[in-house]
Amino acid sequence: MSDTLDASLMARAVELAARGCYTTMPNPSVGCVIAHGDRVVGEGWHRRAGEAHAEVNALAVAGELARGATAYVTLEPCSHQGRTPPCANALIKAGVSRVVYGMQDPNPNVSGRGLEALRQAGILVDGPMLEAEAMTLNPGFIKRQRLGLPWVRVKLAMSLDGRTAMASGESQWITGPAARSDVQRLRARSSAIITGVDTVLLDNPALTVRPTELNLENAADIARDQPLRVVVDSKLRTPRDAQLLTDGGDTLVASAQGGQLPGAEVVVLDNGKGQVDLTGLLKVLATSECNEVLVEAGAKLAGAFIAAGVVDELIIYMAPKLLGSLARPLLALPLENMSDAVSVKIVDIQPVGDDWRITAHPVPAQGIN
């Protein structure tokens, strides 16, 4: 089998895996292609936690044609019993002769066991293949397995001169409808959305995924499972009639003091200064199997996350507008010296309608490598 053909079929498996990025949480997105040479006989991807994994779906399509075939899987086939049976066993039972994997399981307690089970059954195992692409599919799952923390993505919207709102607080709308739809898709792939109590007091947001704004074919199915809403509220100032507490969705309030709020779970995470311990909050979310979290907050909380060194990715939507020197800044990050500047690596810039989306990673990134 040529390396070029292997890479092509693994690239197809990566494409298939991406179809599940909005619905598989807390599981990883995985794709599988089964082929005899360049003849594809089965394809599949993991659609939703609790349902069949990618390998099982591809084997169901291939049927008896799986015998003697090569399976291309973006993630090492699982070897343990979870909500579904082990995929390594399914591949062995189906009689595939070779498995090419994209990356090993990031869980250090099980990594390599699925591959070893395949080898013990006489199946040829090759890989990793397109490992970087395979890792890009599941940054949150990988980080949670390796470090016990979710992937933290901070979303910001600003004018061309780096302002987020007028001095009065007026901010609707800096960006256009295409950018707002893009944010909905960021929400949809997130296990939790974090905001601050000041945003709740100012805007009374719902922080839900709205299917009508996703611009995706399976929008209703994607929006079926809504992300957890998280409010950072050190003094429990969240109004009891806030949408986040009254709309029936799941809400967690992280506070520095004890208390109760009807409609929410309150967790006390005091950093010793009367503030919420942000790293502690992320650990709580990881324990709840949150892979990716999206911070949608004002300048103060967004700046606090960056200052704490827990941000993996910045998504900045830049609108072709000038709001002027009286308008509010992008971040509350009071730095005095150039040596204190936070360096970022810009990894992508894309037009989104009339706006631009900038993707950047803080340096050094709190990432998955």
Image (cartoon, helix red, strand yellow):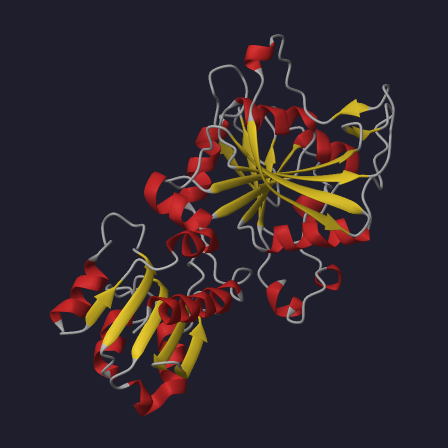
Instruction: Identify which residue is drawn at 42% across, 59% down.
Output: 27
* Left or right: where 246 falls relative to 345: right
Which quadrant of the figure has residue 275?
top right
Instruction: Identify which residue is drawn at 30% across, 91% down.
Output: 64
* Left or right: where 83 falls relative to 265: left
Query: Looking at the figure, which quarter contains the C terminus?
Result: top left
Asked whether residue 86 appears in the rendered view, the answer is no
Name the one closer to the observer, 74 or 177.
74
* Left or right: where 295 falls relative to 62: right
Q: How many marks?
A: 0
Asked whether residue 205 appears in the rendered view, the answer is yes
Name the one closer to the observer, 256 or 110.
110
Q: Position of residue 35 (x, y in %)?
A: 36, 80
Q: Position of residue 46 (x, y in %)?
A: 44, 69
Name the one closer to the observer, 278 or 326.
326
Residue lying farthest to the bottom in this orientation: 64
Query: Looking at the figure, which quarter contains the N terminus?
Result: bottom left
Q: Position of residue 18 (x, y in %)?
A: 51, 63
Which quadrant of the figure has residue 166?
top right
Name the one closer to the observer, 14 or 146.
14
Query: Is residue 201 depicted above or below 307 in this figure?
Result: below
Q: Position of residue 249 (x, y in %)?
A: 62, 53
Instruction: Identify which residue is drawn at 46% across, 29% down.
Output: 279
Query: Is residue 348 depicted above or below 302 in this figure?
Result: below
Instruction: Identify which residue is drawn at 61% across, 46% down.
Output: 263
